[in-house]
Amino acid sequence: MKNKGILPLFRTRNTVFTFNDLSLILSETDEIRLRSKIKYYVKKGDLFRVRKGIYAKDRNYDRLDLATKIYTPAYISLETVLARAGIVFQYYKDIFVVSYLSRRIVCDNQGYVYKKLKNEALTNSAGVENAGNYYMATKERAFMDALYFYGDYHFDNLSPLEKEKCFALLPVYGNKKLAARLKTYFK
C-alpha cells in the first residue's frame, strides 16, 4: 500500500506532477521539507522521477500529460493531432507540442518537439480543448498550426476538417500570408 502521506496524490486524475503541483496536493509550503518528502517517496518507489522537477505516480504515466508539463503554457498539436484525426497518414514517434519556445528533447526514451508560437496566439484558447490532464488542439487548430509553422505542407486527407472552423481561427494568428495559404487548400 502507498504511504498515507502521499495518498492525496493518488486520488487525482493526473499522472504527471510538477514540483509546484506536489506542493499544492501535499499541502507543503516549506520547500526544503517538500524536497525531502519527494526524495523519500522516490526512494520508496511511491513516485517516479521523470525529469528534474517532474514526477509521475509510476512508469505508466500519460506521455501527453508530460509533454505539456515540461514547458508551460503548452498544448498538443501539429502531427500528433493531425495523425490521430487521419489528416496525415505518416507515423510520427515524437509528440508535437506548441509552446513558448522551440526545441526537441528526449525524456524517458520519448521525443518531444516543441514549436514556438507568439504569446497572443499561444494563450488564445480558440480551437484548444481540455483533454483532462492537458490541453490539445482540435484538428482544425492543429491544421492551422501546421500551415502557420510549415507554410506549404502536404496533407493526405482534408475531408475530416470543417472549412468554416479553419477560417474562424485566422484571427488567432494575425497573419495575412496564412489567410492566403488557407485559401489554396480550400479552393
Image: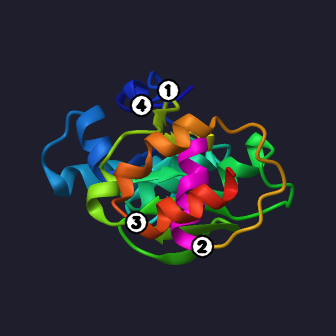
Question: Which element carries disc 4, helix, strand or loop?
Answer: helix
Q: Closer to us: mark 2 or mark 1?
A: 2
Q: CA distance from mark 2 to mark 3?
A: 15 Å
Nearest to viewer (mark 4 / mark 2): 2
Q: Which numbered disc covers residue 171?
A: none
- Residue identifier under label 1: 13
Judge the density around disc 3: few (<14), some (14-19), many (≥20) Cα neighbours within 10 Å: few
**Most frequent secondary structure within the magenta stretch:** helix
**Residue behind mark 2:** 150
Is mark 2 in CB contact (under 8 Å) with mark 3?
no
Comes first in the chain, label 2 or label 1: 1
What are the residue bounds of the magenta stretch? 140-151
How packed mark 4 is, by other alpha carbons closer than 10 Å (few <14, some 14-19, many 20 or more), is many
> Image quadrant for the N terminus?
top right
- Residue 84: give x, y in percent of width and height: 75, 43
Which mark's residue is nearer the viewer, 2 or 3? Answer: 3
Q: In the rendered structure, which amino acid carries the disc numbered 4?
A: Leu
Q: Is residue 143 magenta?
A: yes
- Tell which tag, 3 or 1, sits nearer the viewer: 3
Q: Label 4, on which residue?
A: 9
Q: Could you tell which of marks 4 and 2 lies nearer the N-terminus?
A: 4
| Horizontal side of residue 17 vs 85, given as left or right | left
Q: Is residue 45 visible?
A: no
Residue drawn at (35%, 50%) of the image: 171
Task: State how far apart marks 1 and 4 are (Cα).
Answer: 9 Å
- The disc at residue 176 is 3
Question: In the rendered structure, which amino acid carries the disc numbered 3?
Answer: Lys
Asked if residue 27 is positioned above or below residue 174 in the image, the reply reads above
Mark positioned earlier in the residue sequence (3 or 1)? 1
Relative to the observer, which residue lies in front, 172 or 187? Answer: 187
Disc 2 crowd, CA 10 A, few/some/many (<14, 14-19, 20+): few
Secondary-structure class at tag 2: helix
